[in-house]
Amino acid sequence: MLHQFLVFASEAKLLAAAGLGCWLLAAIAVVAEKRRNARPSLDQVGWVPWTGIFLAATLCGAMFILFGVKAILQG
């Protein structure tokens, strides 16, 4: 099913799907940031900049979805 979608989808649909993937990454980054803030030991919080990943993924996802939906609606 997924293979058929990827092969026969238009560029607009693929762009919208990539935007949804970016938003999924942003949701994972929010959960990871909340887990990092809840750690009892502040010396072992990790090095991944989850806030920056969240912002970049959210903005890219919004842009991809905007362009994808615009192209889908225009036909």
Image (spheres, grey):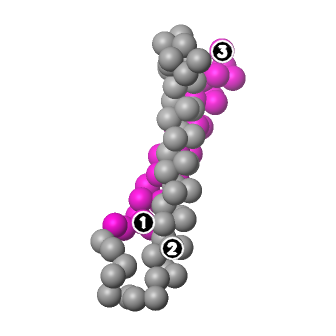
Does residue 48 lie above or below 22 as drawn? below
Q: Disc 2 or 1, which lies upstream in sequence? A: 2
Looking at the rendered image, the quarter that the C terminus falls into is top right
Q: Residue furthest right?
A: 73
Q: Disc 1 or 3, which lies upstream in sequence? A: 1
Q: Which residue lies at the image location 45% right of the left edge and 76% below the top edge? A: 36
Quarter of the view holding residue 66:
top right
The residue at which mark 2 appears reads as 35
| Chief secondary structure of the magenta portion | helix
Dot 1: element: helix
**1 vs 3, front mark:** 1
Q: Which residue lies at the image location 55% right of the left edge and 48% below the top edge? A: 23
Q: Residue furthest front?
A: 40
Q: Which residue lies at the image location 56% right of the left edge and 56% below the top edge? A: 27
Q: Mark 1 and mark 3: span between their CA atoms?
A: 37 Å
The residue at which mark 1 appears reads as 50
Is 50 inside the magenta-drawn segment? yes
Q: Which residue lies at the image location 51% right of the left edge and 30% below the top edge? A: 15
Give the class, few, some or many, for how many residues have Cα within 10 Å of label 1's Cα (few <14, many ≥20).
some
Does residue 14 lie above or below 59 as drawn? above
